[in-house]
Image (spheres, rainbow, N blue to C red):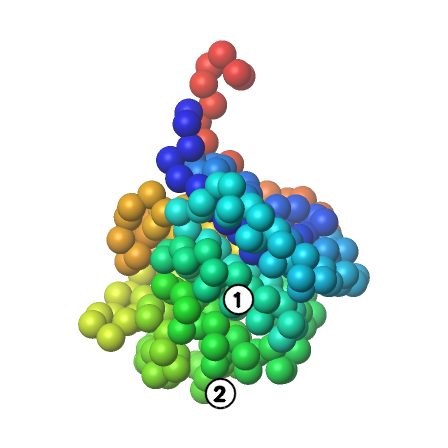
Amino acid sequence: MKPKSKILIIAGSDSSGGAGIQADIKTATALGCYAMTAITAVTIQNTTGVKSIVPINSKQISNQIEFTCKDIKPDAIKIGMLHSTNVINSVIRSIDLIKVKKIILDPVMIAKGGAKLIDNNAIKLLRNELIQRVSLITPNIPEAEILTNIQIRTKNDMIFAARKLLSLKAKNVLVKGGHLNSGRFVEDIFVNKKEIKIIKNRRHTTNNTHGTGCTLSSAISSYFSCGKSLKKSCELATKYVNNSIRFNLSYGKGHGPINHLSSIIIDKKFR
């Protein structure tokens, strides 16, 4: 199968393979896209938590972005972990230079085990400068609370926080509702100045959800890069993630990964 589109992923790595660049590449590939990468940090982690983070020099991050795009122009960009002001500034300069219109930002701030992955000055710069340059920002509830200083306990709080992000010049916002105790369904809310769309998927009781945020934003980028509307991309991506969680892989002793291969049907001759 020939890839349907090309995606540049700007994010940190995950040595355990469940999140970060590794999850992003798996997702894009599983959904029929060609993945390129610019690695922002090397994390040493497994399913029980993050042991350490080795940052990549901001100049080298820019070099990865610009040199790659000079040769292969991406149809969309997914941005994940940006751990410092220097890194965010370098990414802003590079995306302004390469002029790709479809950009998805997953504001990665806290690892599944609770480790903080970004400093306060970087959060401020992301909020004030980066979100206005992207097509969509996809915070989960803790990230939306940090970005807006709004306590989120209900769906209405999620919508209020999304509108606060719109007031900060975000174009579109998808607030992920997985952290909200809302019964049998997970409700993610897509918001822009024209509409509000609640996307419902069945909640699966499992500890194996490592990398769902990275996977979702990469899935949205994949569908969006292939010509789907942003809202439809969000709907399809949440279904892909939900289906990948449903397999309930039990790898590791902590928060295990999801099954990124859930979308793939293997041809008989390769079985």
Q: Which residue is the site of mark 1?
A: 93
**Relative to 161, 130 lies left or right:** right
Residue in the image at 65% along x and 72% along y: 86
**Relative to 84, 177 lies left or right:** left
Residue 41: x %, y % from top left: 69, 59
Q: Is residue 18 visible?
A: yes
Check disc 1 and give the amino acid type.
Arg
- Mark 2 closeness class: few <14, some 14–19, many ≥20 residues within 10 Å: few
Q: CA distance from mark 2 to mark 1?
A: 27 Å
Q: Which residue is the site of mark 2?
A: 149
Check disc 2 and give the amino acid type.
Asn
Q: Secondary structure at mark 2?
A: loop
Judge whether 163 appears above or below 133 on screen: below
In primary-sequence order, the first of circles 2 and 1 is 1
Furthest-left residue in this view: 194
Residue 57: x %, y % from top left: 72, 62
Closer to us: mark 2 or mark 1?
1
Quarter-wise, where is residue 189 in the image? bottom left
Residue in the image at 58% along x and 71% along y: 89
Residue in the image at 40% along x and 55% along y: 100
Furthest-right residue in this view: 51
Residue 131: x %, y % from top left: 44, 72
Between 173 and 88, which is closer to the camera in this rendering?
Answer: 88
Quarter-wise, where is residue 73 in the image? top left
